[in-house]
Image (spheres, rainbow, N blue to C red):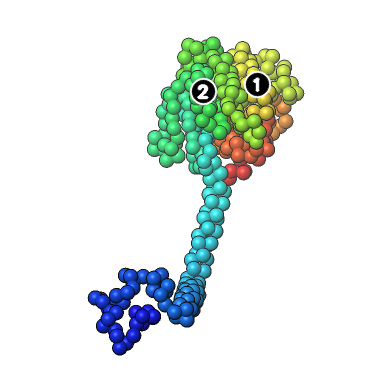
Amino acid sequence: VHGCRCFRPDRASDFLGAGGRCARMPLFSTSAFLARCPPQLRQRRRVLSVATLVLALAGLQALVSVTSFVGGPQNTSADSRSSAVRHAEADGRAALATTQPGAGKKLLVMGGNGYVGREVCRLAVARGYKVTSLSRRGENPEPDSKELSAVTWVKGDATNKGTVQGLVDNADAVVHAIGLLFDSNSGLTNLNLVVSGSKSTAGEDSTYDRITRMTAFNVIDAVRGKFRMPFGYSPTPVLFVSAAEAGWPDVALGEQVEGVAPEWLRQYLAAKRAVEANIQSSPDTIRPVIFRPSLIWSWTKFDVLPVIPFFNIANALGVPFVDKTVTVSTLSKSIIAGLEDASVSGVQRFMQMEQLEKKIG
């Protein structure tokens, strides 16, 4: 009101209406007031407004500076803690990768409840693999085992292509440990109760061709049929438990020994060799690792313990067609080592198995 040009102190009552505003001015507003004020006053108010704005900005900047000064060390400390946590997590992942190289990977074991298969399952679980076993019974052979209790036990027929395909499609690698020593045509099937580590028996259709060749061929065909990206993929590891005698044609006197061998043994070796040949024919899709153990033993497998020394002595004396025996521990560890080492491929005799075992410890 004091800025209104019509205001005169000696005549204030004539101009001030109710509420103390000038009766000649509209309801007070900044724009109306400035429009009626003298130019000097309007200029003065603009200067004050600019000054107020400058002071406000300066105060805000000061507040930010103080906040940064006070909070800076705390944020730095938080960043340091966050960095330490990240390093600890990275170290933890590195340690886990060392102790559990199979973490996040899926392994299918054909015949996982057998003498060799169960040891492969046990080791694989301990090293972080998610393990699935396919077998006729589909049962955990050792329910009290912590590692074997972590295996997914699937009951099914490995001679069925569809069954095998479904499991292979969900696996990163496959171990084939299905086999029997005396098939239904050998005339010696009752001996399986003695020599079989899983005490399995042979049915009427349990021939070497079906149990060994067909089941392994189903795995090989399933791996070949898996969907793959057009680039950047690695061949799928397929590890097959064969027999030392399958290599007889490659050693001195081996063919002559096989020529006088019983028919059931020749049929047994024919099935093993068919798988070996097939599994090595697709290096673009399959990384084949073939294990050729002689007699497989452990201190609790009493049926073979008496003959173990004779095999080992014959091998030590240089008999070319007799390989040194291996323990089930050596074989299973070498299988896991061959699975984890991408450079391992092809036939592995007892010498290579003993070296691979050392990688597992």
Residue at position x 29%, y 85% in the image: 11
Q: For the view shown, which residue lies furthest in the bottom direction? A: 10
Q: Nearer the viewer, residue 288 or 114?
A: 288
Q: Amino acid at mark 1?
A: Asn
Indicate the position of residue 334 as horizontal and vertical percent values: 60, 37
Kindly give the residue lying farthest to the left in the view shown: 18
Q: Who is closer to the viewer here, 44 or 27?
A: 27
Above or below — where is 260 with respect to 133? above
**Is residue 7 depicted above or below 225 in this figure?**
below
What type is the residue that disc 2 sits on? Answer: Val
For image coordinates 60% across by 30% down, the residue present is 228
Q: Label 1 belongs to which residue?
A: 278
Crowd class of label 1 (few under 14; some 14 to 19; many from 20; radius 10 Å): some
Q: Quadrant of residue 313?
A: top right
| Quadrant holding the C terminus | top right
Residue 256 placement: quadrant:
top right
* Image location (x, y in percent) of residue 12: 29, 84
On the rendered structure, is 12 left or right of 347?
Answer: left
Identify the residue at horizontal 72%, vertical 18% (top origin): 255
Where residue 57 sits: x, y (%)?
49, 74
**Nearest to viewer (mark 1 / mark 2):** 2
Image side of residue 115 versus residue 249, left or right: left
Q: Where does the N terminus fall, quadrant-wise?
A: bottom left
Residue 260 placement (x, y as % from top left):
67, 14
Foreground: 283 or 142?
Answer: 283
- Callout 1: SS: helix
Decide: marks 1, 2 in contact (CB < 8 A)? no
Mark 1 or mark 2: whose residue is earlier in sequence: 2
Total of numbered circles in the picture? 2
Distance from the alpha carbon under mark 1 to that under mark 2: 17 Å
Q: Which residue is mark 2?
A: 164
